Image (cartoon, rainbow, N blue to C red):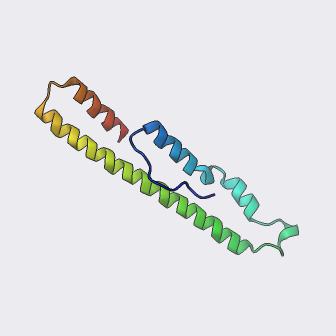
Amino acid sequence: MAAPSGAASCEDFAEFQELLRVMRTIDDRIVHELNTTIPTASFVGKIDASQTCKELYQSLTDAHTSRERIIKNCIAQTSSVVKTLREERDKAQDDVALLKQLRKEQTKV
């Protein structure tokens, strides 16, 4: 169960949330994954449980690393947008649309 690869778009917050939901699938199904990874008594000799557990651990680690990278990337992108909007707001304090956009981006962070 690999996490989706590719660049995450932070522009559409709902899309970003959906991407994180999909990437969380392996965590949400951990009980199932463990039940299918650890062999029952009848399959003990046919499956290398140690190797299968290592593969599951690697999948979990990869998924967590990928999610962390995407989240940190979006925080950095959105923080940059907030900084730019604050600078613009300092120049034009009466711009209501700019203030709304700034608040929206701050909420996103």
Image side of residue 41 versus residue 90, left or right: right
Give the residue at the far right of this rendering.
42
Q: Quadrant of the N terminus?
A: bottom right
Residue at point 67% right, 69% down? 53
Q: How far across and down, in percent of the image, does residue 20 sit?
A: 51, 47
Give the residue at the far left of this rendering.
91
Q: Quadrant of the C terminus?
A: top left
Residue at point 61% right, 50% down? 25
Image side of residue 19 versus residue 50, left or right: left
Residue at point 61% right, 66% down? 57
Image side of residue 9 versus residue 76, left or right: right
Q: How far across and down, in percent of the image, does residue 56 sit?
A: 64, 65
Residue at point 24% right, 25% down? 97
Give the residue at the far front of this rendering.
6
Q: How far across and down, in percent of the image, does residue 18 sit?
A: 52, 41
Q: Would you identify the image quadrant in which residue 60 lies?
A: bottom right
Q: Would you identify the image quadrant in which residue 10 lies?
A: top left
Above or below, 27 against 84 in this view is below
Above or below, 85 against 46 in this view is above
Image side of residue 66 versus residue 57, left or right: left
